[in-house]
Amino acid sequence: MTKAQLDAAFLTVSEAGEKAFVPYIMAGDGGLESLNERIRFLADSGATAIELGLPFSDPVADGPTIQAAGIRALEAGTTVQAVLDEVAKEKASRNVPLVIMTYLNPVFAYGVEAFASACAAAGISGLILPDLPLEEEGLVVEALQKHEIALIRLVALTSTPDRIRALAERAEGFLYAVTVAGTTGERATFVDQLGTHLQELKEISKAPVLAGFGVSTPEHVKELSQYCDGVVVGSKIVDALHQGDRQQVAELIRSRKQA
């Protein structure tokens, strides 16, 4: 799949009058052999796209739940190459776009061009690099464009208006609106004026705006989706899958249709 297929997935949801739901899972958590089956389960449950985390030893944007999942995956011997090889097996039959979330070090260690090429071969549609500043995007943009992979930008609550506009103007795939100040993880409430912030992003972004970080209940999904195009849910999905509670995962994804 390419970024065009990611765009098509969001368009399909929008034309149906629904909101997008992108679940995050940690590749290799629960065993690499279960990865494709989990992807199929999430797709069948109604995921618009799936964010696939690559385990990394220094995950600066990840809260405790996802850090623990990354440790489990690393202890099971999960590597970048093994993940890409595994998802490549079902590239032809997969009907949901995959977006990889990782950090710069693994990409540089692999080689930027080689990584982009391997992602394309595995059917990856987008890439999220939380530690890549706007000013340094030149390090990866050419390779990603060559292989038709979207570079998905994150906008922090603390970003300046000028920086927000620059990120929104470059947005592709979707614009990831970080809804908390800090790392990923479940939250009880969000900051005041978050709805206004999301609406303003939606007005200026070239791509759909999805809210993520701290989204963990059907109520959160419904609340935040009023103001943007959908949500990304990570820690709650990772924890529920680890606990074997797939019903909770399916209910979370279904809540997007009630938003």
Image: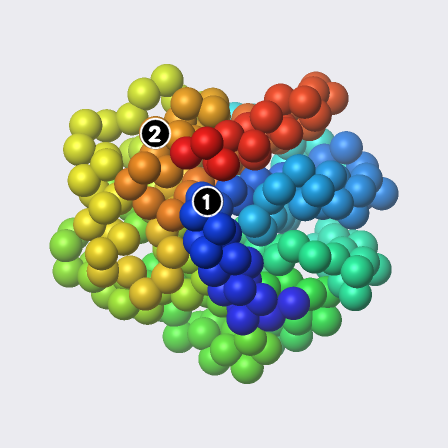
State whether residue 201 is above or below residue 142.
above
Q: Are marks 2 and 1 in contact (CB under 8 Å)?
A: no
Is residue 159 in view?
no
Asked if residue 181 lies left or right of residue 10, the reply is left
- Residue placed most toward the observer, 3 or 35: 3
Most extreme residue toward the left, as rendered? 161
Residue assigned mark 2: 223
- Residue type at numbered disc 1: Glu
- Percent across and percent down for residue 1 are 65, 67
Q: Which mark is residue 18?
A: 1
Secondary element type, mark 1: loop
Asked if residue 76 lies left or right of residue 239, the reply is right
- Percent across and percent down for residue 246 are 70, 25
Asked if residue 45 lies left or right of residue 63, the reply is right
Q: Say which residue appears at 71% left-offset and 32% top-offset.
A: 72
- Residue type at numbered disc 2: Glu
Where, by quadrant of the figure, is residue 194 drawn?
A: top left
